Image (cartoon, rainbow, N blue to C red):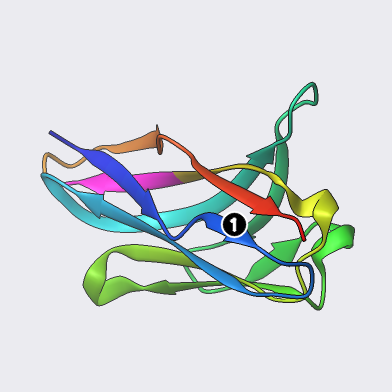
Amino acid sequence: QVQLVESGGGLVQPGGSLRLSCAASGSIFSIYAGSWFRQAPGKRRELVAAITDGGSTNYRDSVKGRFTISRDNAKNTVYLQMNGLKPEDTAVYYCNADLNLRVGSRVNYWGQGTQVTVSS
């Protein structure tokens, strides 16, 4: 069974840091591209950061300079390092990835989500 498993969420004070991980497991060959989305209560899901197969990255303006997306191809994992967290970063964070499956196809998957709460 192919799945994305997220970890690393939690409660942190303003100005603090968290690192989210998104590990792909199952009959996969590799992660082609990955991204992180977030959804706050009553709001639409929004793209936070993305990384391509070549390692190029892009970020929404509100997190530029504070968040860093990266990938470890050997571990089939995508990370989101979040520094300087603000209360407005509070949301459920979702991993999304295009996975190269061993059967030869490429399929898009979502993780289950991990809660990030920034509060004093």
What residue is shown at x 25% (from left), y 39% (from top)? 3
Q: Which amino acid does label 1 sit on?
A: Leu
As drawn, is 33 to the left or to the right of 44?
left
- Residue 68 in magenta stretch: no
Q: Is the magenta stretch mostly helix, strand or loop?
A: strand
As drawn, is 81 to the left or to the right of 14?
left
Q: Magenta segment, which residues? A: 97-101
Q: In which quarter of the image is the N terminus?
A: top left
User: SS of the residue at dot 1?
Assistant: strand
Q: Is residue 45 above or below residue 118?
A: above
Is the residue marked by circle 1 packed among few (<14), some (14-19), or many (20+) residues within 10 Å?
A: some
As drawn, is 25 to the left or to the right of 111?
left
As drawn, is 18 to the left or to the right of 33?
right
Residue 100 point in image, percent of width and height: 27, 48
Q: Foreground: 88 or 32? A: 88
Q: Foreground: 103 or 35? A: 35
Q: Mark 1 points at which residue?
A: 11
The residue positioned farthest toward the right in the image shown = 61
Q: In which quarter of the image is the C terminus?
A: bottom right
Residue 6 point in image, percent of width and height: 38, 50
The residue positioned farthest toward the front in the image shown = 120
Q: Is residue 1 above or below residue 70?
A: above
